[in-house]
Image: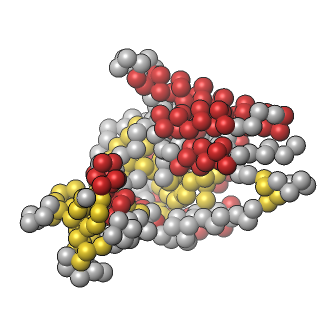
């Protein structure tokens, strides 16, 4: 039966997809439930929406019921230039890598299932930070149900494998299967590497009704991180065999979380893959505030920076003066001007 979803519903669904914070997602889910046409054809979707409302309500509830914590938090609030989740089989070295890259004191153990809860940490790269979230392992017979919640705010994934483990190909297959069962897809479409993920052609059912994507699918770009390179002869070759064997179309990097070898490549790779653009702001007549950049993605504009500064500034924004490699010094530009890395801007309001 055709779903006959209305434009109001589709707008709410689009807002839900774009939202990152659980509270924001919850608000849009309630709007979806309110506006979805109530008939047999949408029964399934209504069920999904209700289930997600329950999940997120519980998640938020455990985080902040009258300020008191009731249970563990599984969704880490996004900070820094991007949030990257560490996924892998038991003992792959996710926590060791997290600790190496962020200086965290993540629990590291010579036995599997050491990590029990998501652990955030900040990895410095030049003058910005990437947020890395260490997660419990995934195996053929084990995955935490809340991992889906944890991955909601993520911008990408580091899929960590132990190159010295003869079973590592099977482990990856098991992980990908577990994720697919939970509607999570990993892919190699990083905007700054292979390019942005192509939008599929619309498909239609027998009644000519467009078949819509499941709004609850999570699709994340991933990098295959071959860890424990210190234990194998040629980590690069091992990674190549692995990707060919499994027909994985993911960028790869070989590291040793223990010795640190190769780890320095991860920051620049993420920076490039995510097409991060840094922008510094300044006050008229004063030097630029170069301590902490605002971070955007390529294609984003002066208005996006204003929104990060404050929503009142964004709504009152008239123009900006800009200094950078692609403009002449102090050039006046409108809110829709697309920014380049290391631009300095001065926001002018009405
Ligand atoms: N030789 C070597 N050992 C490593 C490396 N990275 C991690 N290890 C060791 O591998 C074991 C597991 O490391 P963890 O970081 O706890 O692994 P994990 O993936 O977080 O494991 P779970 O939390 O159980 O999922 C520890 O004994 C680490 O010291 C590496 O690059 N080289
Ligand atoms: Mg761990």
Direction from residue 2 to residue 82 in the image, left or right: left
Q: Which of 85/254 is in front?
A: 85
- Residue 276 location, x and y as percent? 38, 64
In this rendering, the count of numbered labels is 0
- Picture quadrant of residue 247: bottom right
Direction from residue 216 to residue 331 in the image, left or right: left
* Outermost residue toward the right in this view: 206
- Residue 1 location, x and y as percent? 88, 43
Q: Residue at x 23, y 70 (%)?
A: 321
Inspect this view and state whether residue 127 appears: no
State whether residue 72 is above or below residue 104.
Answer: above
Q: Residue at x 17, y 62 (%)?
A: 282
Q: Residue at x 53, y 23 (%)?
A: 58
Q: Which of 109/131 is in front?
A: 131
| Quadrant, the C terminus | bottom left
Direction from residue 195 to residue 296 in the image, left or right: left
Figure colour scheme: secondary structure
State whether residue 349 is above or below residue 107.
Answer: below
């Amino acid at each position: 039966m055709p779903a006959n979803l209305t434009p109001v519903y589709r707008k709410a669904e689009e807002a839900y997809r774009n939202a990152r914070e659980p509270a924001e997602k919850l608000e849009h889910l309630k709007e979806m439930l309110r506006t979805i046409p109530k008939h047999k054809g949408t029964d399934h979707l209504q069920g999904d929406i209700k289930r997600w409302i329950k999940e997120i309500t519980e998640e938020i509830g455990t985080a902040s019921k009258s300020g008191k914590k009731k249970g563990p938090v599984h969704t880490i609030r996004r900070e820094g230039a991007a949030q990257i989740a560490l996924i892998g089989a038991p003992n792959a070295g996710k926590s060791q890598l997290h600790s190496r890259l962020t200086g965290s004191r993540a629990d590291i153990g010579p036995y599997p299932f050491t990590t029990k809860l998501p652990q955030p940490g900040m990895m410095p790269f030049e003058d910005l930070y990437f947020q890395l979230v260490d997660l419990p392992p995934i195996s053929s017979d084990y995955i935490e149900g809340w991992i889906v919640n944890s991955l909601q705010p993520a911008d990408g994934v580091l899929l960590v494998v132990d190159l010295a483990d003869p079973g590592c190909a099977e482990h990856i297959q098991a992980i990908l299967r577990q994720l697919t069962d939970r509607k999570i897809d990993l892919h190699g479409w990083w905007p700054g590497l292979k390019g942005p993920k192509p939008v599929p052609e619309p498909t239609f059912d027998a009644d000519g009704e467009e078949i819509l994507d499941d709004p609850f699918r999570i699709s994340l770009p991933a990098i295959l991180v071959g860890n424990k390179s210190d234990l194998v002869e040629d980590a690069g070759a091992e990674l190549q065999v692995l990707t060919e064997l499994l027909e994985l179309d993911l960028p790869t990097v070989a590291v040793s979380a223990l010795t640190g070898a190769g780890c320095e490549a991860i920051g620049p790779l993420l920076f490039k893959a995510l097409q991060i653009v840094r922008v510094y702001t300044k006050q008229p007549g004063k030097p630029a505030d170069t301590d902490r950049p605002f971070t955007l993605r390529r294609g984003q504009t002066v208005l996006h920076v204003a929104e990060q500064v404050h929503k009142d500034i964004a709504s009152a924004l008239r123009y900006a003066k800009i200094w950078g490699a692609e403009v002449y010094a102090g050039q006046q530009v409108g809110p829709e001007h697309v920014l380049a890395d290391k631009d300095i801007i001065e926001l002018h309001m009405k």
